[in-house]
């Protein structure tokens, strides 16, 4: 198993699929699991039920995926906020995909449908990262910077960081 964590828009889903392909294993994304199970977007869950309700849904999805999936798993950006989730990640091959605010702006425009970035996207992104960076680092066995790298380059860096052999 390989678990990818990091902020929204860093490329966890894209890189996760590439890593899974190179390892010859399955790929799973907990945000996709949530959308499929709930029948609505994450943004809609935030608007209709609030962040606390979403975090409870997210926690269940992450715990279920960690119990069931043996391939590459991409977690939602805020999943590491939960202490129980962080405890489950202890000892697993977790990679924190990092990027700076300028890279985030390039990739997401910081103006797309991201419920936590609705007002002042750059400032809110920085604040989110200040609150979360230490948690990403806490759970990670390795940190891979994604700035100015292609998804293929990041996928290779993940494999290299974990010293994993391609299939």
Image (cartoon, helix red, strand yellow):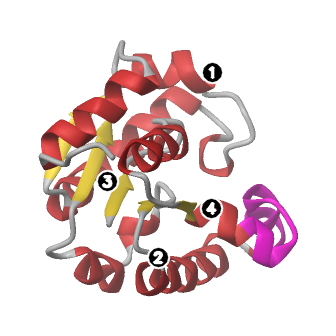
The earlier-in-sequence mark between 3 and 4 is: 4
- The secondary structure type at the circle numbered 2 is loop
| Residue 117 colored in magenta in the image | no
Between marks 3 and 1, how big is the CA–CA gap?
A: 21 Å
Give the residue number, with chain letter if any, for mark 1: 109
Which mark is in front, 2 or 4? 2
The earlier-in-sequence mark between 2 and 4 is: 4
- Left or right side of 24 for 96: left
Q: Position of residue 155 (x, y in %)?
A: 35, 34
- Residue at the image point whose x is 15% and y is 49% from the top: 162
- The secondary structure type at the circle numbered 3 is helix
- The secondary structure type at the circle numbered 4 is helix
- Left or right side of 132 for 93: left
Is residue 84 visible in the rendered image? The answer is: yes
Q: Main secondary structure of the magenta part?
A: helix
Asked if residue 126 is positioned above or below residue 141 in the image, the reply reads above
Between marks 3 and 2, how big is the CA–CA gap?
A: 28 Å
Give the residue number, with chain letter if any, for mark 3: 131
The earlier-in-sequence mark between 3 and 1 is: 1
The residue lying toward the viewer, choosing from 160 and 11, is: 160
- Residue at the image point whose x is 24% and y is 60% from the top: 135
- The secondary structure type at the circle numbered 1 is loop
Q: Position of residue 143 (x, y in %)?
A: 19, 42
Is label 2 in contact with label 4 (beta carbons under 8 Å)? no
Give the residue number, with chain letter if any, for mark 2: 69
The circle drawn on residue 31 is 4
Q: Quadrant of residue 28?
A: bottom right
**Magenta segment:** 35-48
Is label 3 in contact with label 4 (beta carbons under 8 Å)? no
């Amino acid at each position: 198993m390989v678990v990818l964590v990091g902020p929204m828009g860093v490329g966890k889903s894209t890189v996760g699929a590439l890593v899974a392909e190179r390892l010859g294993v399955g790929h799973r994304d907990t945000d996709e699991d949530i959308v499929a199970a709930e029948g609505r977007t994450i943004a809609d869950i935030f608007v209709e039920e609030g962040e606390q309700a979403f975090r409870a849904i997210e926690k269940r999805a992450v715990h279920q995926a960690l119990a069931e999936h043996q391939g590459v798993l991409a977690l939602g950006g805020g999943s590491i906020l939960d202490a129980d989730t962080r405890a489950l990640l202890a000892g697993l091959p977790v990679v924190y995909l990092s990027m700076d605010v300028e890279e985030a702006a390039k990739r997401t425009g910081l103006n797309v449908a991201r419920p936590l970035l609705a007002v002042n996207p750059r400032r809110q992104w920085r604040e989110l990262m200040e609150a979360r960076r230490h948690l990403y680092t806490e759970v990670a066995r390795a940190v891979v910077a994604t700035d100015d790298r292609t998804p293929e380059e990041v996928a290779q860096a993940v494999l290299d960081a974990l010293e994993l052999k391609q299939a």
